[in-house]
Image (cartoon, rainbow, N blue to C red):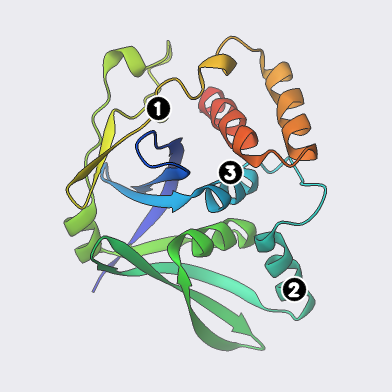
């Protein structure tokens, strides 16, 4: 089966599922998105990894794994989302040590959080993207002046269930300058308020794109 490379399009808070976030993956050479519902901790860990300039005062679990792997010369080569069963995505982490390759089973959210820390590519099989990939619809009111539609999502469909995303989650930050956003992000990380940090990072990323 052919592999399709994915990149992270964005993370949005789910208003209908308490504490859940929607991680949106985009095929690199196409328009289809792969939406995956993940927990708050994993969303925060992914968001922090995306913001390279921000370092938590203490290592998160995925940072600890990265430090451990570095110490023992283990490298994450790639992550493959290889199976979809009853709405649950299954992933494998392809690791290498002393030129010996190992495959480790992992939750998709954990696998992606680690892929970011190792700068490892993320793939899925074409059959999975054909089954679960969607074209997300964006309304014109959700686009900013530069036409960026990567952040605001009307809804994603996950196993037939609409997961509505909160359009106002980033609203308090829209009027802030980039300098103020970065200062607030540093404060949020220092106080270990990673949910706030994730939303601030999303606003910063949207303006960079």
> Tag 3's secondary structure?
helix
Left or right position of 195 against 83: right
The location of residue 40, given as percent across then percent down, is: 53, 47
Left or right position of 108 against 185: left
Q: Quadrant of the N terminus?
A: bottom left
Q: Are the residues tagged 2 and 1 within 8 Å (C-beta)?
A: no
- Marks 3/1: CA distance? 17 Å
Question: Which of the two discs, 2 and 3, labels the residue nearer the N terminus?
Answer: 3
Residue position marked by numbered label 3 in the rendering: 47
Q: Residue at x 43, y 49 (%)?
A: 7
Q: Residue at x 33, y 30 (%)?
A: 153
Q: Are the residues tagged 3 and 1 within 8 Å (C-beta)?
A: no
The location of residue 138, given as percent across then percent down, is: 27, 25
Q: In the image, which disc is placed on residue 68?
A: 2
The location of residue 193, given as percent across then percent down, is: 69, 38
- Marks 2/3: CA distance? 21 Å
């Amino acid at each position: 089966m052919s592999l399709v490379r994915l990149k992270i399009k964005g993370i949005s808070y789910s208003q209908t599922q308490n504490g859940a976030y929607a991680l949106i993956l985009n095929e690199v050479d196409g328009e289809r998105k792969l939406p995956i519902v993940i927990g708050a901790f994993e969303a925060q860990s992914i968001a922090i990894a995306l913001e390279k300039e921000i370092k938590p005062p203490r290592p998160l679990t995925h940072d600890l794994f990265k430090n451990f792997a570095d110490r023992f010369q283990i490298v994450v080569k790639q992550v493959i989302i290889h199976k979809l069963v009853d709405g649950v995505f299954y992933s494998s982490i392809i690791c290498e040590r002393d030129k010996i390759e190992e495959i480790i089973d992992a939750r998709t959210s954990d696998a992606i959080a680690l892929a970011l820390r190792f700068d490892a590519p993320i793939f899925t099989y074409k059959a999975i993207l054909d089954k679960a990939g969607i074209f997300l619809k964006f309304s014109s009111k959700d686009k900013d002046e530069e036409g960026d539609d990567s952040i605001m999502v009307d809804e994603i469909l996950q196993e037939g269930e609409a997961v509505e995303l909160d359009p106002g989650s980033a609203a308090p930050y829209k009027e802030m300058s980039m300098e103020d956003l970065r200062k607030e992000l540093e404060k949020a990380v220092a106080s270990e308020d990673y949910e706030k940090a994730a939303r601030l990072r999303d606003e910063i990323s949207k303006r960079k794109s």
